[in-house]
């Protein structure tokens, strides 16, 4: 049975996973679909995280809610986890260097 993700706006190139997806899991897009409706996860991705629903070139904007929220620092394929390791924030420089697991600033201890 496919894992589901939710695409909020038809111009979004990412969607939010509604369930954990294992490596090579089939992912089905729910929502205002403008890209492919199913694809395979390229790695294990936890529920609540973003997954690419379309190819995103290095330097291209990451779009969620129909609004650019970041920029790809490398090419991102459909089914790939979109997070701090392959995108940077458009909001401030500190947002681009957060801890990949906790999301906290690296200079702050995380419990």
Image (cartoon, grey):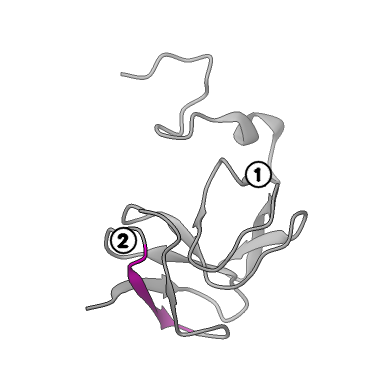
- Circle 1: element type: strand
CA distance for labels 2 and 1: 24 Å
Please rate how many residues cluster around mark 1, counting C-alpha atoms within 10 Å: few if below 14, some from 14 to 19, many from 20: some
Task: Estimate the x, y position of residue 68 in percent, counting from the top left.
Answer: 67, 60
Q: Mark 2 sits on what residue?
A: 21
Q: Which numbered disc flags the more N-terminal residue, 2 or 1? A: 2
Task: Estimate the x, y position of residue 69 in percent, counting from the top left.
Answer: 63, 55
Q: Which mark is residue 8?
A: none
Please rate how many residues cluster around mark 2, counting C-alpha atoms within 10 Å: few if below 14, some from 14 to 19, many from 20: many
| Camera-side residue of 67 and 79 | 79
Give the residue drawn at x 57%, y 83%. Answer: 35
Q: Quadrant of the C terminus?
A: top left
Q: Is residue 9 above or below residue 87?
A: below
Give the residue drawn at x 40%, y 73%. Answer: 6
* Segment tinted magenta in the rendering: 24-32
Q: Mark 1 sits on what residue?
A: 89
Position of residue 75 in the picture relative to residue 42 (left or right): right
Position of residue 55 in the picture relative to residue 25 (left or right): right
Position of residue 73 in the picture relative to residue 65 (left or right): right
């Amino acid at each position: 049975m496919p894992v589901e993700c939710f695409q909020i706006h038809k111009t979004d190139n990412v969607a939010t996973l509604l369930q954990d997806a294992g490596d090579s899991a089939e992912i089905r897009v729910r929502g205002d679909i403008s890209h492919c409706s199913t694809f395979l996860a390229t790695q294990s991705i936890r529920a609540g995280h973003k997954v690419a629903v379309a190819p995103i070139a290095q330097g291209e904007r990451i779009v969620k809610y129909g609004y650019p929220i970041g920029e790809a620092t490398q090419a991102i394929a459909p089914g790939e986890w979109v997070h701090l390791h392959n995108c940077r924030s458009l909001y401030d420089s500190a947002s681009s260097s957060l801890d990949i697991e906790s999301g906290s600033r690296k200079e702050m201890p995380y419990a």
